[in-house]
Image: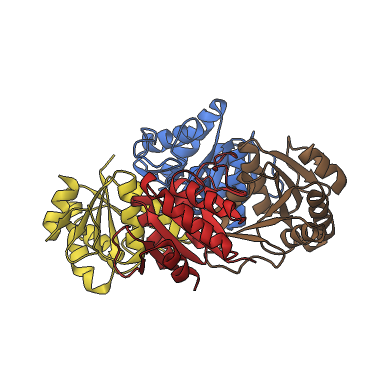
Chain colours: A red, B brown, C blue, D yellow
Amino acid sequence: MAVQVAVIGSGVEHEGRAEQVGRLLAKRGCTVVTGGRGEVMAAAARGAKAAGGTTIGIVPGDQRGEANEWIDHEIVTGIGHARNLAVVASSDAVIAVGGKWGTLSEIGFASLLGRRVVILEPGLAVEDVPRASTPEEAVELACG
Amino acid sequence: MAVQVAVIGSGVEHEGRAEQVGRLLAKRGCTVVTGGRGEVMAAAARGAKAAGGTTIGIVPGDQRGEANEWIDHEIVTGIGHARNLAVVASSDAVIAVGGKWGTLSEIGFASLLGRRVVILEPGLAVEDVPRASTPEEAVELACG
Amino acid sequence: MAVQVAVIGSGVEHEGRAEQVGRLLAKRGCTVVTGGRGEVMAAAARGAKAAGGTTIGIVPGDQRGEANEWIDHEIVTGIGHARNLAVVASSDAVIAVGGKWGTLSEIGFASLLGRRVVILEPGLAVEDVPRASTPEEAVELACG
Amino acid sequence: MAVQVAVIGSGVEHEGRAEQVGRLLAKRGCTVVTGGRGEVMAAAARGAKAAGGTTIGIVPGDQRGEANEWIDHEIVTGIGHARNLAVVASSDAVIAVGGKWGTLSEIGFASLLGRRVVILEPGLAVEDVPRASTPEEAVELACG
């Protein structure tokens, strides 16, 4: 089974970095896992597909078709924001790009479960979580 | 995105039929979704892989590595039996092979969400759910 | 801690029986647990309050104020239909009054978790689940 | 229905403050909601009961009897750490006392859902969340 890495976050101003993270993860052969919706989630999946990678989108609703168009495998959880737990639990490592409260819940869960977490600058301020200056460094820290 | 079909159920005596269902779904190009664990879940995934298909396992625990060896993409939900909702919600159709109480919860959820459900004989007695005599017929009813 | 008994189901034609079940449970000192919304859920809570009992409503949404007016303690799960698991898991016994697919998922989960389940006539057809002819008998079977 | 306030956190060194918070909430007539287990969760419930209050414990497992002895109403979710969402969603306001990664996930969810959140000093460093120096101030900020 391929290594699975989650890209979490939000904010249109972070889409460029998220797309680059997705691309780099795909080049390494990692499957990109996201929450399946827009902004950072869509950008990471778009980047991964552009590099020939595989993408999984774990969405909050209970109907098919909620995931963005760059998702290969849509996981429909039906559990709303609690799907944030599934996004990070399904991943061997997690890279946060931008984001706000939902992203904070995911960083909490990922750390609680012992997953490797990296925050890409500029990003949320969370104590005891490693930070990376560039997408390359983020991917290196997450997968290295 | 490929059509996703869940194979649900349990019981070692049903593994042969489940493997055949998995094989037939893969031949049609459907991705096989299961709860990722043993017996019927493992047999369906094994059949799908034997036919060159793709498999998703949605497991109840919160650590990686719980899925059986025929799973390509492991979704780690961390929500215990509530993952039964995600298994059927993630699928366009659901085929029940054997099974007991957990399967009953999945048939309930799948029907509630409007997914097509087929019970393969011999199987659970549930009113208002179509039944199939053979794996071929089950796959035809689910995907047709 | 008081014994907690879930009343599950739906259907306006079953409200009278549900209200009577709620009343009888409260008279025995049991806390009535429901999914917190309308029809059978509201009727059971109304009956319990009329008899001076305590009620818990476990609702699917993620905002406060979704529960019916007879609920003392609103549990806001945010997990949609997956809250059906919490309704029955929180209960020492479960009484089904009417109902359809959601109720079937709850009967499945309750039985899977080893909770005592009783179906009040007329009710869903589910193999291996005890049935009661009257609210009195249902409460006796659930709590006895 | 009474106002429901969650006390979240962990750490034996924070139990005194948590007990005081529970006591003050109960004196105001608020129901105290917690994750139902030990340390801060148990202390807050103990304080509430000492002041004649009502307590709800929302536990992660799927069997009855996991809650600490100061819990009046045990909600058994069966969804593991995802129950953190239910703890804060069920509350009109949230007070964090100590805590680590699980608490961070709860602060994230509570803020995401628009609940009032207060961090009692000394506590987690989270941007844009109000802080209180004393239990009295925390309760005032949460309930005021």
Name above or below for residue B105 compared with residue D16: above
Query: Does residue A114 appear in this view?
Result: no
Query: Where is residue A4, by image quadrant?
Result: bottom right
Nearest the viewer among B34 and D125 is D125
Q: Residue at x 23, y 53 (%)?
A: D53
Residue B109: quarter of image: top right
Give residue B136's position: percent from left, percent from top. Answer: 87, 46
Please state the horizontal and vertical placement of residue D46, each as a whole percent of the image.
Answer: 25, 63
Relative to residue C9, is residue B11 drawn left or right?
A: right
At 43% from the left and 65% from the top, the residue drawn is A138
Do we see residue D97 in this rendering?
A: yes
Front-most of C126 and D77? D77
Residue at 18% in and 53% down: D130
Q: Left or right? Give the position of D39 relative to A140.
A: left
Which quadrant is the N terminus of chain A positioned in?
bottom right
* B25 or C143: nearer the viewer: B25
Residue most extreme to the top = C13
In terms of image quadrants, where is residue B19? bottom right
Q: How many numbered marks, from 0 up? A: 0
Q: Position of residue B67 (x, y in %)?
A: 64, 65
Residue A139 in picture, x, y percent from top left: 47, 66
C40 in relation to A88, above or below: above
